[in-house]
Every structure is written in C-alpha cells, then in structure tokens.
Image (spheres, helix red, strand yellow):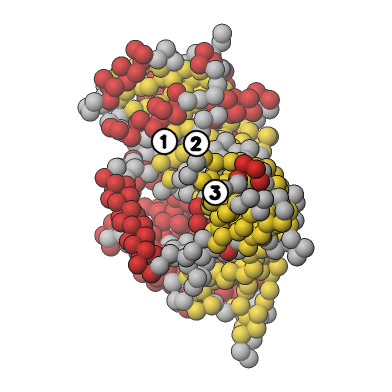
Amino acid sequence: MPVKVSVIVPVYNPGTYIEDCITSLQRQSLPPEEYEVIFVDDGSTDATPARLDALAAEDPRMRVIHQENSGWSGKPRNVGIDAARGEFVMFVDNDDYLGDEALERMYDYGVANGADVVVGKMAGQGRPVPVELFRRNHPRATVENAPLIDSLTPHKMVRRAFLERTGLRFPEGRRRLEDHVFVAEAYLRADNVSVLSDYVCYYHVRRDDASNAGFQRFDPVGYFKNLREALDVVERYTEPGPARDRLFRRWLRVEMVERVRGRRFLVLPDDYRRELFQEIHGVVVERFGPGVAAGLQPTQQVVAALIAANRYDEAVAFAEWEDSIALKVTSGDIVWQDGVLRIDFSAEYASAGDPMAFPAEPANAPLGDPPKEISEAITWVGAQTAVRFGKATSDLLLRERSSSAQHFQPVRFTRERVPVGVGGRVRLVLRTTVTVDPATLPGGGVWDAVVRVKLGGWTKECRLGPVPHAGRAATHAGVVADRAVLPYWTEPHGNLSLDLGASGKRLGLGHAAASVSGDRFHAVLPLYVPGDTKVVLRLASSGGSVDVAGTLSPTADGAQARLEAGLPLATLAGATWRAAVCLAPDAAEPRFHLLPLALRAGNGDVQVIRKPRPGVLLRLARRVRRELGKAASLIKARRV
C-alpha cells in the first residue's frame, strides 16, 4: 500500500525528551502501513543513536539515518525529504509531539482541498504559538486572506511532489531562521495552503532546561544576516507595493519591534541590548520603505520610528513605560442558561495598577517624525488608541491545563467610553459576555479561562480573575453533555477554571435535601441540568450495593435539580444504606458522588438519615492528610 505520509524528525542529543515524540508517532490513528517515520540523527553524542536503532529494529514504521553533525536542522530535514516515500512529508522536531489523529486529519484535509501545504493547529507548552491563525479552518488560505505569515516554524505537512517540482529545500549549515526561508517560499509558491484549526495537531514544547535552540541567546549579526535571506525570498516572489509591505511587516513586527518592547527588551544586558538594537536599525533602514511601518499598531509605530532614527535611549525609556501596562479584568455574573455557561466580564488597560485614561475626543494625526520627547510619544499613542477603540476586540479562550490546547469561545462585547473626572478623559472598557458549551470541548480535565484583548498596539492576555473567594465554586456544577462540569475559582489565585468530569466533594452535593414517600426517593441537589437527565442512584450497605435508575429534572426556578428514583423496598429492608449518585452513567468512566445522607429501611418504610458532620478534630485530621498529600505530589512532580 502506498505511503501517505513520511514524518521527518531531525535529531541531535534530545535525551529523554524524544520519548514523548516517539510515543505520539507510534500512537497515530493513520494505519501503520500508510505512514513512515524517518529519524535523521545529526551526529548525536548521547544515547540517542542506540535508542533509535533499537526502535527501528522492533517497529517497521521507523527508519533511522545516521550522519555527521551538520550544525543545524536544515540538512537533516533535506536528507529526510530525499529518503521519503510518502505522498506528503511532515516535519516534527525531536522534543515536540503530535496529537493522536494529527497525521490522518492533516492528510485527509490536504487531499480534500488539493493543498500543497497543510498547517495544523498548534498548542504551545511554555512556547508561543500563533493564535489568530487558528481561530477557524481555512481550506484555501493565502498570505493575503489569512495570517499565514504568523506561522513560519517548519512543523507543516507538505506535498512531496510540490517539493520535487519546485526543488524547495531548507538552507543548510549552522545558521538561524532556515525555517523562515523554507516556509515563506512554500507559502508563496504553493497552489493552495490549508489551515486545519478544529483539532490540535502539533504540541510545541519548551524543555524544562530551556535548552531548545529557539531559547538560546543568538548572535545579532548572524541572526539578522539570515533574516535578510527570508526577505530576499519575499522580494523574489512578490512585486513592490502593499502586498510586499504587508509580508515584510511580519518580520519588522515580530523579529524587530517586539524585541525592543517592554520587559523583553529591558531584561537584556545593556551591551547586548545595544548590539541588538544596532543590527535591527541596520535592517530597518536598509530594507523597509515607509509603507511597512505605516501599517503597524500605534505603539509599534513609535518603536519602529525610534529604531529607524537610531534613538536607543528613547527606545529604552518607551519600553519602561510599556512595561507598566497590564490588562485589568473584572469578573461579573457566571450562570447556567439554556444548556450553556454564561460568563460576564469587563476588561481595560491599567498603567502602574491604575486604569488608563484616554482623550475623549482624540485627534487622528499620523506619527510623522519620531516624537522629540517620550511624553509626546505616550500622548500620541493614547490618542491613536482612543481613535481605534472601535476596532478593539475581546475574547475568552479555554486552555486545557494538561496539554495547553486552547479554544476560542463565542463572545458578544460592547465598547464603552467611561468618563473620568472633568478633564475630558475616558476609560476604554470592553464589556463581554461569553457562552461556553461544554459539549464542544474535547475530553475532560481542567480548562483555564484566559481573557485576550486587542486594543491599540497591545494584545494582552491574563487569567479571568482574581476574585477574593478563591477555592470556591463560581456557580453550581452542571450536568451537561454526559458529564459533570464545575466552574470554580482556583486556590490560592482566585482565577476561573472549569473541571470537566468533576468528582467528589468539589461538586458541593453536601447541601442535598432528601425525603422518601412510599417507594419514591426525592432529593434536591445543588446542580444545574438543562432538562430531564438519566442518572443512577447507588445504595450501599455492609452487605453489598443496589443500583436503581433515577432522573434529574430542573426545579421550577431552574436553579437546582430534583432527583427522583424508585426504591426496591423488599431488597432494602433491615439495613442502613449510604446513598451516592452517578451523574453521567454513559460516560467512559462513570463516577459515583456520595450524598450526605443514608436510608434506614425497616419493614415497609424508609427513613432518611442525615450524615452527621465530622467533629472538629476529625475535620482537622482530614485537612492535614490533604495537605500532606499535596506536598507529596509536589515533591514527586519535581523529581519527575
């Protein structure tokens, strides 16, 4: 059977970090005979060569090529391309890993859309990855209709016939940004590029020791020499004008301006910071016309102007001001409604902890020459931010804690100018309502709520919170999409998270009120259910347990749930039974949650017995056990 995908993995001294990569490649849903993995060992000096040889001996999907060290990843990838047999090749780094269905989904999507390049959604574990690009699927993406240029890492699936037809290969040798040169040309020469955003295909991982190549301090002279080669590619395949300026703007913004902003710039040693600034200045005056910087956001325009004018001291001062700016979020109502969770919040920017104020009637003037004083730059940025407030956006992403996969949630927001005093100043506030449908979130686990605001020249993220009542539920748990969902405030930080498949006391079922009438059990539970929901009531005694079918229904006000179940009186007679309820009996791993009550069954009648509250000493002992357990888990995690 023809090979559909050849996965190419350049390898150099990854140590144990390669194990997650190997495991994910072996776990792919694509049939084993339809893909191959080519590890190109670039002269590793650790135990990796022997590990890969043993792997290839036991797994026919795995191939290993050994070569002398070439200095960087370009040559190993090219060697892999030449050895590949697949219809597509997929580039994976040895310390990253794939989602289980990545190869199958990306291949099918590429074939369905006739793509030469397929870009799969990424999740960054301690590393930045594109966000806006993966807001939705783009079956036919270009550098003009989608933010493709935001994603220049090599972790793509590329049609092999396209590589052969164009002769496209990675630059080789010890150098930087070889992926920018390759990917930029691929985007500009491909017949079609498809972006798959509804499944996390690639997990981009930062090593615990931060030894990934991308985290090492670079030589500015060599780095920006290599960057010029990426700009050469754009010039080769585009005409002068707005389209080229828009592509160049990506390198100006990401590789230059962003390196000279805020905390990122300030933490560098002064001598290195000056050298970096001078190299960036050289590229800006040499390669970029005025149309490139003109399309930047206001704060970015100021930094670009200071770079072009070679005003290092002013750039440092402006970075110090920007470093004081943060996103301030205030939480509002969090309620269940019509089967979804509605979350309200407001967001604005603060400087040095205080809400920022902007001119109520700003003038829309171009920047012109770089401001003579930083105070002028700050005033101009404030005015332009207010002018552009009508384009400000507010989003909420849910980020899975274990994998860092994140998903945009549907939002509605309004932009409000709130007067400040009598000086003709206003605060720029975004008031947002989010609807979270748990059925759209894959898997279970804990999901953290992250607010993302784009306003003026800033794109900032922060957790939704904090609130003073950390460690408590934000609202009742809900039973939605065949699982319990608990919104809660984290402890100790007081940020909003969602526990999908929540269990135990966190659900708050200790406040249940129950009664028995004849053979019918009734209880009101502090839960939200969108409609009648089938559950299982388990009654357990020293002699065994009995499961009976039950139904959860919304109470008249919709605020809680009423549980009803029939009782097998003859079976229960003569014993005391502890009660527990399974809220999602059809789940892959059903969980029972204890209720704070028991049933005492006599001859023909059943009484509800409330579970007595533990005494002070018992509660203290339990708390000590919990804290000791947390400490042990933390120690174990650090050892791992």
338 left or right of 209 in image: right
| Foreground pick, 8 / 332 | 332
* Crowd tier of the residue under label 3, counting other residues whose Cα lies within 10 Å: few below 14, some 14–19, many 20 or above: some
The CA distance from mark 3 to mark 2 is 55 Å
Residue tagged 2: 202
Secondary structure, mark 3, is strand
- Residue 96 versus residue 491 in the image, above or below: above
347 left or right of 276 in image: right
Q: Position of residue 149 (x, y in %)?
A: 56, 43
Residue tagged 3: 575
The CA distance from mark 1 to mark 3 is 57 Å
Please name the amino acid that badge 2 sits on. Tyr
Q: Position of residue 230 (x, y in %)?
A: 47, 39
Q: Position of residue 182 (x, y in %)?
A: 48, 32
Secondary structure, mark 1, is loop
Secondary structure, mark 2, is strand
Is mark 2 in CB contact (under 8 Å) with mark 1?
yes
- Residue 226 versus residue 126 in the image, above or below: above
| Label placed on residue 9 | none
Residue tagged 1: 96
Please name the amino acid that badge 1 sits on. Asp
* Crowd tier of the residue under label 2, counting other residues whose Cα lies within 10 Å: few below 14, some 14–19, many 20 or above: many
N-terminal label among 1 and 3 = 1
Instruction: Identify the image quadrant of the C terminus.
Output: top left
265 left or right of 583 in image: left
| Foreground pick, 128 / 621 | 621
N-terminal label among 2 and 1 = 1
Q: Nearer the viewer, mark 3 or mark 2?
A: 3
Please name the amino acid that badge 3 sits on. Ala
